[in-house]
Image: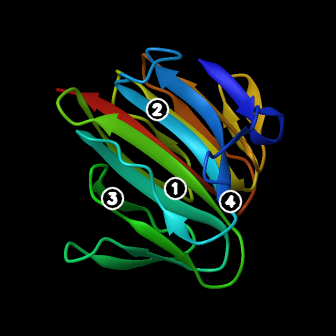
């Protein structure tokens, strides 16, 4: 298991200048032919998403105003805070910012290899998928093994089941379990 604090994850600027990405994890590491990867992106201006053929994407708005995703005839969807939305990576999508910059949590999976489902948790739980996953704390304090996680921190793993214990009366985190085909 690996722990992270998003404030300490290196930033990569987008080629089109419309945002930046903080890659949290990628399997296998440092490859464009990943099985799955997770990142947090900041979108600074409206523009086209990069295409990822044969990849399924799940995006969740973390901060900022609502973002309208225009997938042409396939969909038009408004991202709202902490509500995951899934779409095909090869779909041409334009992001339209409604009120300035946004920050988004992203999980991408190679369609022929694995699947991800992103959910919000607000109580203690144990993960089920033994093949991998990621958690990102939105609020509150959470115990994972012997580690205390607070807002903007998280963990990812490749194996095993893990219990995340909410230590305060209220708190939320995003989590995704990876299921290999």
Q: CA distance from mark 1 to mark 4?
A: 8 Å
Task: Please report contact status of discs 4 and 3: CB closer than 8 Å, yes or no.
Answer: no
**Seen in the image, is 148 located left or right of residue 49?**
right
Is 125 or 6 nearer to us in this picture? 6
Q: Position of residue 168 (x, y in %)?
A: 75, 55
Residue at figure coordinates x 56%, y 52% from the top left: 105
Q: Is residue 87 left or right of residue 98?
A: left
* In front: label 2 or label 4: 2
Q: Earlier in the sequence, mark 1 or mark 3?
A: 3
Q: Residue at x 27, y 50 (%)?
A: 90
Disc 2 is placed on an element classified as strand
User: Which residue is disc 3 drawn over?
Assistant: 86
Q: What residue sits 27% from the left and 31% below the top?
A: 179
Residue holding disc 4: 171
**Residue 41 spot, x, y in % from top left:** 62, 51
- Would residue 79 be found to the left or right of residue 122 on screen? left
Give the spatial CA distance, label 1 vs label 2: 20 Å
Q: In the image, 88: left or right of 153?
A: left
Q: Which residue is mark 1?
A: 121
Q: Which mark sits nearer the N-terminus, 1 or 2?
A: 2
The answer to whether 66 is drawn above or below residue 19 in the figure is: below
- Label 1 neighbour load within 10 Å: few <14, some 14-19, many 20+: some
- The reply to whether the C-beta atoms of the residues labelled 1 and 4 are less than 8 Å apart is no
Q: Are marks 3 and 2 in contact (CB under 8 Å)?
A: no
């Amino acid at each position: 298991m690996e722990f992270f604090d998003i404030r300490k994850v290196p930033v990569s600027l987008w080629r089109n200048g419309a945002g930046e990405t903080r890659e949290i994890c990628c399997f296998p590491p440092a490859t464009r032919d990943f099985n799955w990867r997770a990142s947090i992106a900041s979108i600074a201006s409206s523009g086209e998403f990069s295409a990822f053929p044969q990849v399924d994407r799940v995006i969740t708005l973390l901060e900022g105003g609502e973002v309208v995703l225009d997938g042409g005839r396939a969909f038009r969807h408004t991202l709202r805070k902490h509500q995951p939305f899934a779409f095909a990576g090869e779909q041409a999508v334009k992001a339209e910012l409604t009120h300035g910059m946004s920050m988004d949590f992203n999980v991408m999976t190679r369609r022929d290899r694995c699947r991800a489902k992103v959910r919000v948790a607000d109580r203690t739980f144990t993960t089920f998928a033994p093949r991998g996953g990621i958690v990102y704390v939105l609020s509150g304090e959470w115990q994972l093994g012997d580690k205390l996680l607070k807002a903007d921190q998280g963990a990812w793993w490749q194996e095993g089941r893990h219990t995340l214990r909410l230590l305060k009366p209220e708190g939320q985190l995003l989590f995704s379990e990876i299921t290999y085909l």
